[in-house]
Amino acid sequence: MLTLCLAGPVSAEWAFVETWSDPVDGFETKVAQMINDDGFGLHLYRNPVGRVMALYALPDRIGNLPDEGLVAVVTPQGFAAKDIIAHTEQGRIVEYARSTGRAVRDRLWHGEGQVPVGTLADVLEAPSVALTVTLANGETVETDWSMEGASLPIAQALGLNIEGVAAGAAWEDAASQAMLAAMSACQFPKLDIACVQKVTACSPQISDARDIDGFEVCVAKGE
C-alpha cells in the first residue's frame, strides 16, 4: 500500500459562504469552508433538518474514493481519530457517511441546542484537523487543515456561539433590525447621504466584529 503525504504548511483561510450546494443531495445551505494548500476542501454546514455535516473534498489531481467501506480517518489534533465508513444504502435511523467518489460526507453532530458534542466539539477545540483518505486503488493520502480563524465562519454557517462569537437566529434577527433601524433613520425627513455613508462605514461592527452595541455606538457618534 502506497501512502502519499501531501500535508504541508497551511496558509489558506476559512471563509463563510451564504449559499452553497451540497454535492451529495443537492440542497442549498450556508457553509464554512477551507480549501487548503493541498487542494483538499473541508466544508462544515447544516442539512435541511439541522444536523451538522462535514464534507471532505478531494483535489482533481488524485483518484477517486470508493463508494463503500472505510474511506477516510479524521483526527482533530489532540483528540481521538474517527473512522469514516461510507454506505450506499442509508439506514432508517442511522445516518451513514456517503461518498461521491470526489468527496465524502459525514455527520458530525445531531445539531440540537447550542453546545456541540462528539466529533464537532473536538473539531472546534482542535488547532488543526488531519485527514487520511483511502482511494479506490488502495492508495492512501494525508492532508490537514488549520482551524485558525475558523470560529467566525463556523458560527455564521452553523448558527452557534463559538469562542464568544455571537450567532444564532435571535442574534441574526437583532443585527438585521439594528441595521434596518439605522438605515431607516437616514431616510427621514429626507434621504441623508452622509448618514448612509456613516452607517455603511459602521457596518463591519456587525458583519466582522459581531457587535451590535458597538455598531449603534459607532452610528451615534457625532450626532
Image (cartoon, helix red, strand yellow):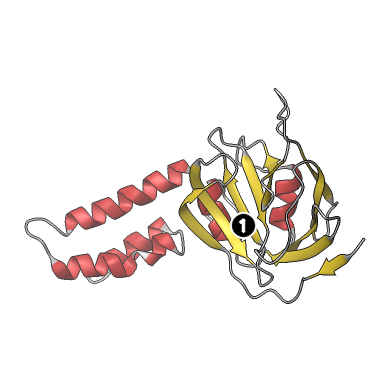
Q: Residue furthest top?
A: 92
Q: Find residue 92 and report its image quarter.
A: top right
Q: Whole-percent x and y of residue 20?
A: 49, 51
- Please tell me which residue lies in front, 96 or 122: 96
The quadrant of the rendering that contains the C terminus is bottom left
Count neighbours of disc 1 (C-alpha within 10 A) and say few if under 14, some if 14 to 19, many if 20 or more. few
- Please tell me which residue lies in front, 178 or 108: 108
Q: Find residue 57 and report its image quarter.
A: bottom right
Relative to 140, residue 174 above or below: above
Residue at image position (39%, 58%) is: 213
The quadrant of the rendering that contains the N terminus is bottom right
Q: Can you see residue 20? A: yes
Residue at image position (68%, 40%) is: 109
Q: Whole-percent x and y of residue 65?
A: 75, 51
Circle 1: residue type? Glu
Q: Is residue 123 left or right of residue 45?
A: right
